């Protein structure tokens, strides 16, 4: 039974606390707050990395519901949370014209098809809309892709994750920012930092300045 059909039969429950009435209640939304610095060996020497919450409790449930269970309605509150946080980055993020260039982290194509599309691109676009509503210029640049040879990283240790992504993150000519532009890499979860490090490397080689990595959550 599809998610929409289920909603007609069963009462809507918050994906975080399971209370009735709303898909994502205000109390659980407060889980995503100020930017939390994230440090990983894979990210040393790279741009600063931040998360809006720890990958546990309601925040974890929201990410999983959005990413794995087709609750694309969560793009609106999750994108809004990211948009509220970005202007508070210690390091400037927009370009000299005040435009935020947002680069979503890529997913495996097969996985994206199974999930109904590139979930981070959808989230980045919602984030850009919220930034625009607040008076900030914002452009989403879905310019990264994973080669077909990249495998699912679940269960891989840091070394294996890095090896899995080596040479498999690529640029595609879609809304590519001008060379020298500052960009912010957006992701859902920072685990070992291997994905962010691989993306940073490719974006830097393309002549872009990655000013920060911002994720919804990070593991402990």
Image (cartoon, grey):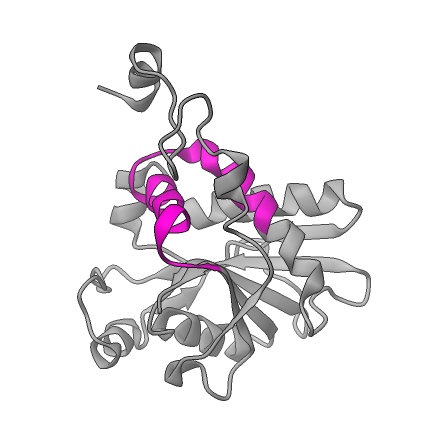
Residue found at the far bottom of this picture:
45
Question: For this rendering, which residue is in front, 137 or 89?
Answer: 89
Asked where in the image residue 42 lies, by quadrant, the reply is bottom left
Residue 195 can be seen, yes or no: yes
- 137 lies above or below 126: below
Instruction: Specify whether 22 is left or right of 68.
Output: right
| The stretch drawn in magenta includes residue 10 | no
Q: Position of residue 9 (x, y in %)?
A: 29, 11
- 127 lies above or below 171: above
Question: For this rendering, which residue is in front, 83 or 183?
Answer: 83
Instruction: Specify whether 217 is left or right of 81.
Output: left
Q: Position of residue 215 (x, y in %)?
A: 48, 60
Question: For this rendering, which residue is in front, 131 or 101?
Answer: 131
Q: Position of residue 62 (x, y in %)?
A: 39, 43
Residue found at the far top of this picture:
9
Q: Tell me the residue at 40%/74% (across/down).
A: 198
Asked where in the image residue 64 lies, by quadrant, the reply is top left
Instruction: Specify whether 185 is left or right of 14.
Output: right
- 96 lies above or below 167: above
Magenta stretch in the rendered image: 53-81
Q: Quadrant of the C terminus?
A: bottom left
Q: Quadrant of the N terminus?
A: top left
Residue 105 can be seen, yes or no: no
Q: Tell me the residue at 54%/49% (across/down).
A: 124
| The stretch drawn in magenta includes residue 60 | yes
Q: Position of residue 218 (x, y in %)?
A: 41, 64
């Amino acid at each position: 039974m599809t998610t929409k059909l289920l909603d007609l039969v069963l009462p809507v429950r918050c994906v975080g606390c399971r209370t009735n009435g709303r898909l994502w209640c205000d109390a659980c939304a407060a889980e995503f707050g100020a930017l939390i610095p994230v440090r990983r060996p894979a990210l040393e020497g790279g741009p600063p990395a931040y998360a809006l919450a720890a990958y546990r409790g309601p925040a974890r449930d929201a990410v999983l519901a959005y990413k794995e269970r087709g609750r694309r309605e969560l793009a609106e509150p999750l994108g809004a949370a990211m948009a509220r946080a970005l202007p508070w980055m210690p390091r400037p993020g927009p370009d000299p014209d005040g435009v935020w260039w947002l680069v979503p982290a890529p997913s495996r194509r097969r996985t994206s098809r199974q999930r109904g599309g590139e979930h981070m691109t959808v989230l980045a676009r919602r984030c850009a809309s919220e930034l625009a509503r607040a008076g900030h210029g914002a452009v989403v640049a879905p310019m990264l892709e994973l080669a077909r040879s990249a495998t699912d990283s679940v269960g891989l240790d840091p070394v294996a994750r890095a090896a899995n992504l080596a040479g498999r993150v690529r640029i595609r000519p879609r809304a590519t920012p001008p060379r020298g532009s500052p960009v912010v890499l957006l992701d859902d979860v920072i685990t070992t930092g291997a994905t962010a490090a691989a993306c940073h490397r490719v974006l830097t080689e393309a002549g872009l300045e990655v000013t920060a990595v911002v994720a919804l959550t990070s593991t402990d």
